Amino acid sequence: RKEVEQDPGPFNVPEGATVAFNCTYSNSASQSFFWYRQDCRKEPKLLMSVYSSGNEDGRFTAQLNRASQYISLLIRDSKLSDSATYLCVVNTGNQFYFGTGTSLTVIP
Amino acid sequence: NAGVTQTPKFRILKIGQSMTLQCTQDMNHNYMYWYRQDPGMGLKLIYYSVGAGITDKGEVPNGYNVSRSTTEDFPLRLELAAPSQTSVYFCASSRSSYEQYFGPGTRLTVT
């Protein structure tokens, strides 16, 4: 079983739409959780950390459910510039485990 | 701060050649990592280090070696390059289990 699983998409949404990504992880001992964004042919960049209480950064909201081992990312009012691949990342011990990413294209 | 820097940005190797990918970070992070990312795929961990003098294998270490003589530097050595090592290589650093910061990557082609 993979450490981190994500729906690869692609998600094609119109500007202004709300879109949600989900991710599950297999190790209940995992300690920290993140969403990264990766643009084509670029390095991953931190979008936000994810906390059990849920956290929000502008149009982005992240949720963590430790009991279900489930992480989500909600993007409201999608912009063209949100088009990218979104990576779910989980830290367990000394290692970070990456999902394969969910591709988002925001259409004018 | 420059963050995480990697050199070279691009490289073409012939089968059987060797090379070293350089990675340097100036954030005084104790943890450093090497990943590879094949087209359309996720990142796979090659090696990681939790501090100077300490390294450990990740998911795909075969064909690679690393060393960590200083906190700042974490070079990745490819010996006897093979076409299967054609990939994009990313170096990253972190302060323990806190978020990772990535370098811009090295695009390697082995022909």
Image (tube, coloured by chain):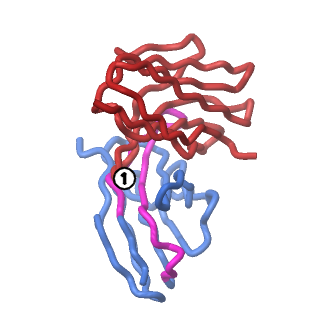
Chain colours: A red, B blue
Can you tell which quarter of the image residue A32 is in? Answer: top right
Can you tell which quarter of the image residue A6 is in? Answer: top right
Q: Residue at x 54, y 48 (%)?
A: B50
Q: Position of residue B56 (x, y in %)?
A: 61, 58
Is residue B34 in sight in this rendering? no
Q: Residue at x 41, y 51 (%)?
A: B71
Tag 1: residue type? Glu
Can you tell which quarter of the image residue A82 is in? Answer: top left
Q: Which residues are magenta?
A: B81-106
> Which residue occupies the foreground of this view, B31 or A16?
A16
Extreme residue toward the left, this view: B1
> Total number of numbered labels?
1
Q: Position of residue A62 (x, y in %)?
A: 50, 19
Q: Is residue B105 above or below residue A61?
A: below
> Which residue occupies the foreground of this view, B40 or B59?
B40
Apparent side of residue A93 relative to residue B76 in the rendered image (left or right): right
Q: Secondary structure at mark 1?
A: loop
Quickly name the residue at label 1: B72
Apparent side of residue A7 relative to residue A19 in the rendered image (left or right): right
Q: Position of residue B3 (x, y in %)?
A: 30, 44
In the rendered image, residue B103 lying in the magenta stretch gets the answer yes
